[in-house]
Amino acid sequence: MSTSTNTPTDPKLTNKTLADKTVVITGATDGIGKETALELARLGATLIVVGRNPDKGKHVQVELQQYGQHQRVQFISADLSTRAGVNHLVDSLHNQTDHIDVLINNAGGLYGERWITSDDIEATYAMNHLNPLLLTWQLGPLLKQAEGARVINLTSSGHRFARVNMDNLQGEKHYIALGNYGAAKLVNLMTMYHWGDALAAEGIAFFAADPGGASTDMTAQMQAKFVPWFMRPLWPLMKLSFGRADPIASRQKAARSSIYAASSTDLNGQTGLYIASNGKVVKSSKLSYNTRLQKQLWELSMKQLELSPDDKQGSSVPNVFA
């Protein structure tokens, strides 16, 4: 069993806080996602955890049931690097629940080398932007059935150093692992900001959760070559931010922003907020609020996903889910 010793991130949160809420969290069989799920289980949520490994998923399901002291935990195996995997998850969720109160798009990917998925999309861009967007879109009907539904996307402080190069969103011209990762997170953030008003009109709030640095399977495989050449002399210092001296504690700390976004009543009636790793609401990068670029990225994403937003009022943002 895990050596996790989660404690409430907010003294107002009790084991009844999420007792009537159904929470779906992707990438929840390890790392930050698992620590988030543990705390949400303690808060009484009905959990649907998603991961690729069925054996690991079943083990985590039992652990969450024991930790939360209830049986309201289900596991779905899905590979979210592909659209087929997203579609499989959506079908499974429609079979398991009639509503979703909280969707946490926690799963992501960081890759040392550029590779293309079966959908002919670069993997970093697919995992951190397009596929979470597609999943949220397709789960719209279930989110609309909940009162005060929330969508939470894990983001990264790396978005603050990223720029939007429309000719290199998928590393077509040059690929640096952390650079493309930060850019994908920025694109996702800007796209969701653009969609935010339409989501709010459907009764769905959006929050971006920044976990900060943590010791996870993803950060464990990072190397100096993942960063631009001019940053490589600083790599030994950068590694310290990943919390490798105490992995569990670093993951628990990193989970705070997602837990707060999923459970805090302070966020009722609000949307479009960026929550830092300390659980505080802060501003994201100046570039992320560029509405012209947000619209451009939204339209590109819709084209890439072959989606057709309802545009009856002349807006590029859908008024209803497809």
Image (cartoon, grey):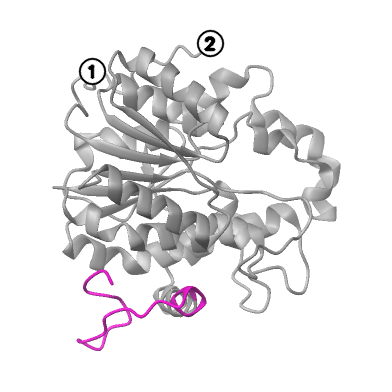
Pointer 1 with pointer 2, Cβ within 8 A: no
Secondary element at image label 2: loop
In the image, is 71 to the left or to the right of 276?
Answer: left
The correct choice, above or below, for 211 with respect to 140 in the image is: above
Question: As shown in the figure, which amino acid type bears the numbered disc 2?
Answer: Thr
Q: Is residue 204 visible?
A: no
Q: Position of residue 64 (x, y in %)?
A: 40, 20
Task: Report the residue at 25% width, 34% height from top.
Answer: 264
Q: Farthest left residue?
A: 147
Mark 1 lies on residue: 15
Q: Secondary structure at mark 1?
A: loop
Comes first in the chain, label 1 or label 2: 2
Magenta stretch prevailing secondary structure: loop
Residue 219 shown in magenta: no
Residue 168 to residue 252: above or below: below
- In this view of the protein, can residue 318 be seen by the observer? yes
Residue type at numbered disc 1: Asn
For disc 1, the neighbor class at 10 Å (few under 14, some 14 to 19, many from 20) is some
Nearer to us in this view, 305 or 251: 305
Question: What's the distance in space between the residues labelled 1 and 2, CA to CA?
Answer: 20 Å
Q: Which residues are magenta?
A: 301-322
The reply to whether the magenta stretch includes residue 313 is yes
Vertically, is 291 above or below 41?
A: below
Residue placed most toward the observer, 108 or 276: 108
The label number, if any, that marks residue 48 in the structure image: none
Q: Position of residue 239 (x, y in %)?
A: 73, 33
Which residue ends up furthest to the front in the rendered image?
95
Residue at 48%, 26% in the rendered image: 58
Residue beneath disc 2: 3
Residue 94 horizontal/vertical position (percent): 29, 51
Q: Position of residue 319 (x, y in %)?
A: 22, 74
> Along the line of sight, which residue is nearer the eye, 86 or 301?
86
